[in-house]
Structure formats: C-alpha cells, structure tokens
Image (cartoon, grey):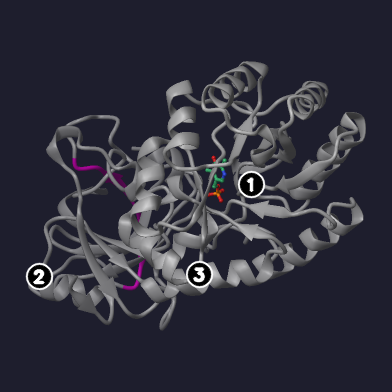
Amino acid sequence: MQRFETARQAALQMRPDVPVYCFRPDVLKADARQFVDMFPGKVAYAVKTNGEELVLRTLAEAGINAFDVASPAEFAAVRAVAPDAEMLYMHPVKAQSDIRLALEEYGIRVIAVDHEAEVTKLTRVVRALDIDPGSITVFVRIQTKGHAAYELSKKFGAGPAHAVELLQRLNRYGFKVGICFHVGSQIEDPDTYERALVSADWVRGRAGVELAGLDVGGGFPAEYGHDPNRKKPEMPSLEALMTQFRGDIAEWGFDEMPLVAEPGRVIVARAFSLIVRVLLRKGKRLYINDGIWASLSDSWTGKITLPARFIPDPAIRSRNGDAGKLVPFRVCGATCDSVDILSRPFWLPETVDTGDWIEIGHIGAYSLSLRTHFNGFYPDTFVEVMKPFDEGTAPESFASLETMAD
Ligand SMILES: *Cc1c(COP(=O)(O)O)cnc(C)c1O
C-alpha cells in the first residue's frame, strides 16, 4: 500500500479520479487500546462497522482478541486474520444453518437471542451436535429506550417480561445465561446506559437465575465534526462517559459479573478519511465520485456532522469567489440515480471547482462496509496516511446538519 504523510499529499501526487480511502493504522490501534483501557470487561469489536481485512488485522495486532460477528462471512473474515480470537454471535435473528456453522465449524460458544423461536433453533442444533448446553452462554437481548442517532430497539430486543421468560427457559435447558442490549449507535444522551441498566436489573430480579454476564453492546459515540453555525451539542468526552458508566455499573450491582462491550463506531471512525473528487461543479451543486451507494450511505452520514478539508487542485489557475468564505453546496453522488444526493449540504470555500478534491474525515465506521457495486462504481483504492486527520490546522469544511433547499 502506498504511504503518505497527509491525504493532501496523496491527492496531489496521485491526482485520483476514484475515491481513495486513507487508512491510519496507528490511530486505529490507539483508539482500540484507549477503549480497552477504559472499559471494565471484555471488548468485542463489532465487525459490521468495518470488516476490511486490514482493519481486523490491525485490531488483532493491537491486542483485540474478541469480535462481535453476525454472519458466516464475518466468521470467516475474523478466523482468517485472528485464528485464536473469540467470536460472539450477537445477531438476535439467525438462520438455523448459520447457528450450526457457528457452533460446529467455528466453535462459537456465545450467542444472542430475543425470541423463543431462536431458542428452539439453538436447542435443535445443540442436540444434533451433542454439545453440552452448559458450555454455551446465551445472552437474552432486552429492549432499551434511549437517545441515539440510530435506534436499534425498534427492530430487536425482548420486552422485560418476555426476557424473564427466555432467561428462565434457557436456564432450565442448562445453558449459561446473560443479558445483553444495544442502546443504538452514536448515543446522544450520557444517561442512556444507565436507563438500560435499570431495565437489565429489573429483568435480573424477576428472572431469579444466575447470570454469567452482562453485554452492554455498542453505542459509544465517536467524535465527528462540528458545524460552527450551530450550538455545540453537549456531550461528555468518552473518558467522562466511561467514568459515569463505571459508576452506573457499580450502582446497579453489575460490577461483580463479567462485562462485555461490542464497540464499533468509537473504535474505527477516526481511522479512515476519504478523498473524493469534484467531477463537476454546476452552480451550487457538486457532483462527486462517491455517494450514498458507496462510502456515503446517507442513512448513516445524514445524522452526523462530518469534518472535511478542501484540497484545491493547483492546476486550476483562475478561480471565482472568495477562498475564505464557506458556502453550502448540494452534493450529488456518482451514480445515475436521482436518490444519490446527500441530504445534507457540504460547506466548502466558495472557490471550489471541477477537479478539486475534498478529504472527508472520521469516515471509518459504516462507510466502506456499506458500499455497493451499483452502476459499476465500487471504490476500492486504499493508501496509508501517517498524520491523524485532526492534527494541524482545524478542518475548514464540514457536512452540515441543515437540510438545503435546491
Ligand atoms: C452494530 C452493532 C454494534 C456496534 O455498534 P456501534 O454503535 O457502532 O458501537 C454492536 N453490537 C451489535 C449487536 C450491533 O448490531
């Protein structure tokens, strides 16, 4: 892989017409280690956030030895780079053939459920393979209510009374049991985990079975950009959040049992930036070589403020406008599809023009993992960049949270 000091140097030397992912392995390692140091339990990286081989390999090198997986392809991806790592199969709704593959071929012994039909599938496989249920820990996923950019409890999780029943049933069958939840991704309220712990405590009290662990899922917020036109949202630092979290864990009496976290976004967001090129400027619109079907899937990027840096093409000798003035541009994606327009404008210098590049920072989570081959565009160029995106002068540009009239 080619290596550069900064993404600007990569852009100016490569003059890329395709999107380029700038990977920062040292940032990834540092963010992973920081999380491991702060979290009082096992850390299982959520592979769906970014399952690139180079990411999994770098995390394994950083000492991550547990992974949250959801599919046969994710089992294989983890096994390929970290043969001894533990896998936690935390998808609540699974194909029975995948459960069998997980238990039989991959030796997975931690699994999540949120419905009795999932328990039925699991027990069928366990009997067929003649596995001692006592060697398997089954986490019952409970619903939570919270404030996150991306809610997940609408789709998954058992209500409290239902969770009690599932725990008792699994306990009768001889499984080790635990409680898990996922408060949603990118939480926006520091009390979110405490509310989930209150529910977990209620379920534990009613179930009256011995718990082998509590898995608090993901949701830990990554740092993104800030729109200077808006009030800065009040969110504590990750450190402060973790201090509060450890206090809540102790207060609700979960500090005596093994804890698990499944962070994704908070570990990988800062490790990548993306260089895109302006293929055409048409008035206040920019047509770029990436979009919602590739790295900028709007369901994810539409709710966060992405920081960006402008990389003007030095070959452009005359420009119109004021280079010091930021104005909003509507950003259109690369495909021939009218939904491929970002819902949020990018604020960029007024002088931006056809041929310039934009480096979008903190794009490591839910970006390249969601890219598709739609319309024949599939960004797949990677370079290594040494300098962290945030080092040096502050990024001048950003994707706003305001919507933009055409
Ligand atoms: C997506 C997911 C995660 C990761 O969530 P982040 O908010 O990115 O940390 C963890 N666990 C499960 C079960 C998930 O589905």
Q: Is residue 376 left or right of residue 298?
A: left
Disc 3 marks a residue whose amino acid type is Gly
Asked if ligand 1 lies within 8 A of label 3, the reply is no
* Residue sitting nearer the eye, 91 or 28: 91
Question: Where is mark 3, residue-wise?
Answer: 63
- The x and y percentages for residue 89 are 53, 39
Question: Where is mark 2, residue-wise?
Answer: 316
Q: Is residue 113 left or right of residue 74?
A: right
Question: Where is mark 1, residue-wise?
Answer: 217
Q: Secondary structure at mark 3?
A: loop
Query: What is the crowding at mark 1: few (fewer than 14 residues within 10 Å), some, or many (at least 20)?
Result: many
Query: What is the crowding at mark 2: few (fewer than 14 residues within 10 Å), some, or many (at least 20)?
Result: few
Query: What is the crowding at mark 3: few (fewer than 14 residues within 10 Å), some, or many (at least 20)?
Result: some
> Would residue 333 be counted in the magenta stretch?
yes
Disc on the earlier residue, 1 or 2: 1
Q: Secondary structure at mark 2?
A: loop
Give the number of the mark in front: 3 or 1: 3
Asked if ligand 1 lies within 8 A of label 1, the reply is yes
- In this orientation, does residue 296 appear? no
Q: Residue at x 83, y 37 (%)?
A: 199
- The x and y percentages for residue 112 are 62, 34
> Would residue 51 be counted in the magenta stretch?
no
Q: Is residue 355 left or right of residue 357?
A: left
Question: What residue span does the magenta drawing correspond to?
Answer: 324-334
Disc 2 marks a residue whose amino acid type is Ile
Give the number of the mark in front: 1 or 2: 1
Q: Residue at x 18, y 65 (%)?
A: 320
